[in-house]
Image: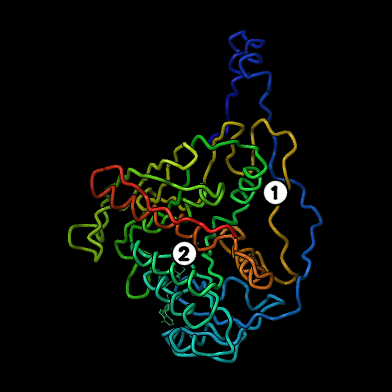
Amino acid sequence: MFENPVYRREFLEKLGLGSLGAVLAGGQATRALAAEQPKLAKQWQPVSDRKIRVGIVGHGVCRMGADFGFQDHPNVEIVAVSDLIPERCEGLMKACRCGKSYESLEVLVKDPKIEAVFVATDAPSHARHCMEALNHGKHALCCVPATWGSVEEGEQLLATVRKTGLKYMMAETSYYHAECHAMRQIYRAGGFGRLVYSEGEYFHHSPTPVPSFKNWRVGCPPLWYPTHSTAYYVGVTGKRFTSVSGVGFRGDFADYRPGANRYDNPFTDEVGLFQTSEGGSSRMTVCKSVHGLIVEQGRVFGERGWMEGMRYRGAMEDLPEVSRPPLPPGVPEGGHGGSHGPLMHEFVSAILEDREPAVNIYEALAMTVPGIIAHRSALKDGESLKIPQYERPKF
Ligand SMILES: NC(=O)c1ccc[n+]([C@@H]2O[C@H](COP(=O)([O-])OP(=O)(O)OC[C@H]3O[C@@H](n4cnc5c(N)ncnc54)[C@H](O)[C@@H]3O)[C@@H](O)[C@H]2O)c1
């Protein structure tokens, strides 16, 4: 989108004011640096030879349960799998090379051998299914979003994570996109300063929805599924959205006409303009009616630098290491920009090392709840609404 940026210095030089440019820029020349570094020979180091005993649930249209590579991780034993639909359950057993299955998540979580569950079921069931797993003493990794349009259910999930003290992680794929990961490392190293502004986008042209269990995708509010976008602020900075004004677009798809969907949702596309806890703003978008476009991406603009794709432009001369954490041999990076493997590996590592996983419940709600509020705002013609904040304990 910014193929040919004009730098302030170049602009002033064009006007014959080059030296003035250096003065106005505070004597700090803006430099263009490539954030993508040559792959260092970083090797995965085992931290334990223990095998976490995992159950996997959900082999729907996107085949997410099998697609994160649990079956290839040296620290994982897949004890059992489940899907309500018998053919899918069989497919999941095959894909995960697992000989045992249960007829439902509700039965699987009763297996005392299982320590952790990957919840790859339909979005409306996520919070309930994770609470079911946690309440049976299992750690939970869950596909996005953390909660489906319900702030209350998100808060119940938070209370359950706090009560049980078990690991909860949301598998937001943008979080481990190479760009988002690099932005996070550079942000942490101070290469952006405070973010003045950021953008996150999930475009998925869907004149007819992707099929889904009990049709949960039909006519759903776009910003109830915000995390691929919001990861480009929350997942970069660890900071929060504090308020939002949302705007919706009424695309001409049958599922969004009056009375056509269970959500009473008229919008095919939504944009939220958020205030952030560091005093900036973010524009987060989920669009289904932009012709032919399918992409998940984001950009960040800070006081000391800005970045889109893998190019950093800014005041930081020595960029930190930005390549993603190494995976054990045989674990594929997987789909969605090579994010599946790193997400699964992070969850497994957090259990082995007994630490908080990267996208814990606080980050998960901070990526999910603002979209729910943004949709509410869009239904009220953009009225500015406050976003609930969930205080993190010091880990
Ligand atoms: N980039 C991403 O992060 C990304 C991409 C695609 C999908 N997803 C998420 O992955 C999840 C799965 O997507 P999908 O399209 O495959 O979903 P889907 O709706 O097609 O399938 C859900 C599956 O869950 C099973 N299920 C529901 N309740 C169950 C229970 N109690 N016990 C056992 N099985 C149960 C159903 O039988 C069904 O097969 C969704 O939450 C979606 O949001 C994320």
Q: Secondary structure at mark 1?
A: loop
Q: Are marks 2 and 1 in contact (CB under 8 Å)?
A: no
Of 260 and 304, which appears nearest the observer? 304
Residue beneath the point at 71% across and 52% down = 323
- Rendering coords of residue 274 (x, y %): 40, 43
Rendered location of residue 145, percent (x, y): 44, 63
Q: Quadrant of residue 20?
A: top right
Indicate if the residue with disc 2 has its beta carbon within 8 Å of ligand 1: yes
Place of residue 5 in the rendered image (x, y in percent of width and height, measured from the top left): 57, 28
Number of dots carrying numbers: 2
**Which amino acid type is marked by label 1?**
Val
Q: Residues within 10 Å of mark 1 (few under 14, many from 20)?
A: many
Q: Which mark is residue 50?
A: none
* Residue 206 in the figure: left or right of residue 188: left
> In the rendered structure, which amino acid carries the disc numbered 2?
Val
252 left or right, relative to 387: left
Residue drawn at 25 percent across, 52 percent down: 252
Q: Residue at x 51, y 50 (%)?
A: 234
* Mark 2, other Cα within 10 Å: few <14 / some 14–19 / many ≥20: many
The residue identified by callout 2 is: 144
Answer above or below: position of 228 versus 183.
below
Q: Quadrant of ligand 1?
A: bottom left
Nearer the observer, 293 or 119: 119
Coordinates of residue 109 in the picture (x, y in percent): 49, 85
The residue that appears at 44% across and 38% down in the rendered structure is 281
Q: Is residue 74 above or below residue 225?
A: below
The secondary structure type at the circle numbered 2 is loop
Q: Earlier in the sequence, mark 2 or mark 1?
A: 2
Q: Name the residue carrying label 1.
A: 322
CA–CA distance between discs 2 and 1? 25 Å
Quarter of the image where the C terminus is located: bottom right
